[in-house]
Image (tube, rainbow, N blue to C red):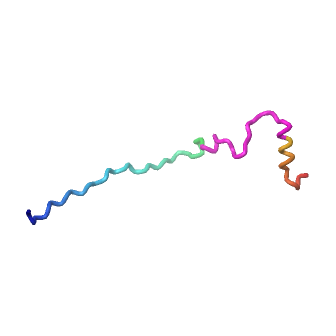
């Protein structure tokens, strides 16, 4: 057995990630998920029915009576 120190291993360098790119496009020219999602509580478009009228009258706030 030798008491000589082992040679130091070369440090490993992790692979470099590409730098984040800045995009200077107009954000309003792109479609967002809000433009395509159906809204909260929306119902499909269709002809009005008696059930819609009943719902409207049931949900009308008291100051609208």
Magenta part, dominant SS: loop
The quadrant where residue 33 appears? top right
Q: Residue at x 91, y 52 (%)?
A: 65
Residue 24 lies, in percent from the top left, at 51, 47
Taking 64 as reference, is 11 left or right? left
- The reply to whether the magenta stretch includes residue 51 is yes
Camera-side residue of 24 and 1: 1
Quadrant housing the N terminus: bottom left
- Most extreme residue toward the bottom is 3
Q: Residue at x 85, y 50 (%)?
A: 60
The quadrant where residue 32 appears? top right
Taking 40 as reference, is 7 left or right? left
**32 relative to 1, above or below:** above
Residue 12 lies, in percent from the top left, at 26, 55
Residue 10 lies, in percent from the top left, at 21, 57
Span colored in magenta: 32-52
Taking 63 as reference, is 1 left or right? left
């Amino acid at each position: 057995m030798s008491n000589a120190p082992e040679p130091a291993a070369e440090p490993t360098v992790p692979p470099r990630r590409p730098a984040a790119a800045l995009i200077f496009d107009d954000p309003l020219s792109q479609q967002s998920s809000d433009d395509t999602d159906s809204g909260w509580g929306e119902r499909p478009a269709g002809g009005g029915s008696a059930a819609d009228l009943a719902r409207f009258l049931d949900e009308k706030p008291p100051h609208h009576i």
